[in-house]
Amino acid sequence: LFKPVSERGPQQSSAPVKASRTRPEQTKPELAQVVTDAKTGRRYSKGKLLGKGGFARCYEMTDLSSNKMYAVKVIPQSRVSKPHQRDKITNEIELHKTLSHKHVVKFSHYFEDQENIYIFLELCSRKSLAHIWKTRRTLTEPEVRYYLRQIISGLKYLHSKGILHRDLKLGNFFVNENMELRLGDFGLAAKLETVEQRKKTICGTPNYLAPEVLNRQGHGTESDVWSLGCVMYTLLCGNPPFETLDLKETYKCIKEIRYNLPSTLSPAAQKLISGILQKNPSDRLTLDQILSHEFFTKGFTPDKLPPNSCIMIPELHP
Ligand code: ADP
């Protein structure tokens, strides 16, 4: 669906002399077929590439002694040579290690060698809601309730531990073989601080920025709720609520809460979205208020979804 950088071909970017010495990207063994953890002696065989992120490539890997499969984030040492880059990964690992919840991607273990850092995670074979959304574009309200309930469950757990995710977006909602949702990617996550202590800088390029984050008032639990509202909107409407051709214009729309609510949405969905997308964080619905909203209490939520709902509208019955 998207073209990884390596597939654009090496010829375009490098000088001819250099290109002729380097082997083509496709055949270059970037990562050994078997990776060994020197401390435990465990060996892992590399499977298919699951995706690419800012720092990492993520591969399916199998523990050769137990046959257990993992999603492994492989981060080249060269990408974390600067202290602040390494700090970011260390923060992600230290924070993720402490988490244990049904709807949070399970952190297994990690190790490093000369070339890479390897982070072993619970495998979510159906990738993420971003992949499902790209194919489906809009989901039905029962499906959205199904996914949102699981996201909220994972998010309530994080918030109860005083942790903010700070980058809630479709690509960070992973889906496993059984169509169960797991919240993941703690690259921007942070411990909740008091309003005074909050760092007012915007780190990375989070997707669904809340107005108070744009106005440099810092990120609270309510800012995660805002992002959740944007996710709900995107899944139901097929496009993000604040999307223009120009980032500056998008930020202006966010600060003015300027978005359209299509009349095709049920009245309950419209009310819930507008209850979440409130400018003032203290006016925004809380996670518990969202769960007790009529959108959830009056409409039915399936217990499970069929795997083919990744590519087509499912037939769901209460
Ligand atoms: P980064 O933090 O560098 O952005 P990501 O966490 O986004 O890296 O991971 C990159 C890609 O790897 C994602 O787009 C996703 O497709 C895949 N991925 C990450 N974690 C998992 C997982 N637990 N199961 C399956 N695929 C995963």
Image (cartoon, rainbow, N blue to C red):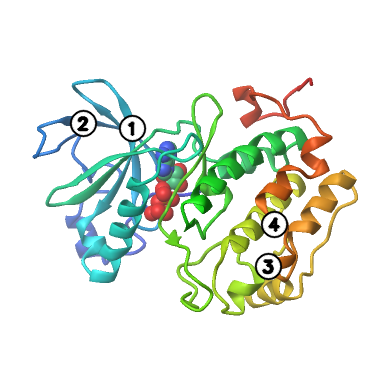
Mark 2 Cα shell of 10 Å, populated few (<14), some (14-19), many (≥20): many
Residue 165, given in percent of the width and then of the height, sits at: 50, 56
Ligand 1 contact, mark 4 (Cβ < 8 Å): no
Say which residue label 4 marks.
240
The residue at 26%/61% (across/down) is: 79
Q: Nearer the viewer, residue 184 or 69?
A: 184
Mark 4 lies on a secondary structure that is: loop
Answer yes or no: is residue 250 visible.
Answer: yes
User: Which mark is first along the chain, 4 or 1?
Assistant: 1
Say which residue label 1 marks.
70
Mark 2 lies on a secondary structure that is: strand
Say which residue label 2 marks.
44
Name the residue type under label 4. Pro
The residue at 52%/53% (across/down) is: 159
Say which residue label 3 marks.
281
Left or right: 64 with respect to 214? left
144 above or below 247?
above
Q: Nearer the viewer, mark 1 or mark 3?
A: 3
Measure the alpha-carbon separation of dots 3 and 4: 20 Å
Q: Are marks 1 and 2 in contact (CB under 8 Å)?
A: yes
